[in-house]
Image (tube, helix red, strand yellow):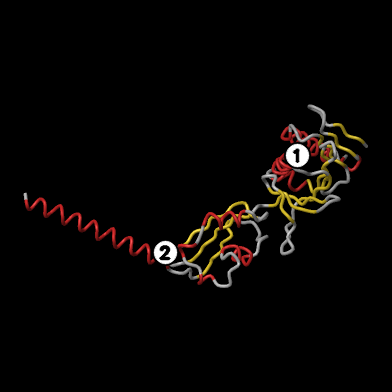
Amino acid sequence: MKYVVWSNIRVLLMIGIVVFLYSFTSYRNSQRKLQKTEVVFVGKSKNFLMQETVNKLLIENRSNVKTIAKLGVDLKKLENSINKQEMVKSSQVFVSVDGVLNAEVIQRTPIARIENEDRSFYIDNEGSMMPVSDLFTTRVMLISGKVDAKNKKKVALLLDKINSDDFMKKNIIGMQVLDNDDVILANRNYDFQIEFGKMIHIEAKILKYKAFFQKAMQDDVLKKYKKINLKFTHQVVCTK
């Protein structure tokens, strides 16, 4: 019986020592200062945001990262600060065991540039608006007219369908959104207007346009047309 009791005491002592050492190590680790920051932009998007901007957000505009204790870092708060940047889609902030404050940033991907009377901005593949960067530019489709909070998702969907089709991506270089939400597309090599109409039945209209274009090219009549109307079901109406 005494042997069993002594064995239990030894087990409890060992557990206590392990807990103490773990707590002591964790406390010492939490009191250590950060060593540096490291910002990584994830993905293939161009850098529309400077690393220095993210660094300042990480250290909350303090002069030296080495004055910040690891325990005092609010990771969620830092992520929220970074995510408020209009160029940022999402971010993850974490501290490594060697005291490096890391930020992995996923930027938004612009798919078109909007030019209207009020301002110029990009729109990304989710329909979110991005400011034009003074640092970098990207070659994307130019859109004029009415793009706002009400129709931006539909515009982004149409752009996504165009960009995901090799023929349309090479063929279409511009878009105009009218006040009634009708869309007019511009061809790269010909002067005719493509009256796309409302941003509905997108895939069917694209198929109609591709079939018309290939047939008209074979017949060598593309230069004769001024307007290509895709609004009507099962037909393409052309105006010379």
Query: What crowding class fits label 1: few (fewer than 14 Cα within 10 Å), some (14-19), or many (20 or more)?
Result: few
Task: Provide the secondary structure element on which disc 2 rests.
Answer: helix
Q: Residue at x 91, y 35 (%)?
A: 239
- Give x and y (percent) for residue 106: 59, 55
Question: Residue at coordinates 33% horizontally, 60% vertically from top-left?
Answer: 23
> Residue at label 2?
30
Residue 240 versus residue 186: which sits nearer the camera?
186
Q: Note whether 83 is above or below 34 in the view shown.
A: above
The kind of residue on which mark 1 rests is: Lys
Residue 237 percent across, percent down from the top left: 86, 31
Mark linked to residue 35: none
Q: Nearer the viewer, mark 1 or mark 2?
A: 2
The one nearer the camera, 163 or 23, is 23
Mark 1 to mark 2: distance in Å? 48 Å
Q: Which mark is residue 150?
A: 1
176 or 145: nearer the viewer? 145
Q: Amino acid at mark 2?
A: Ser
- Give the quarter of the image for residue 166: top right
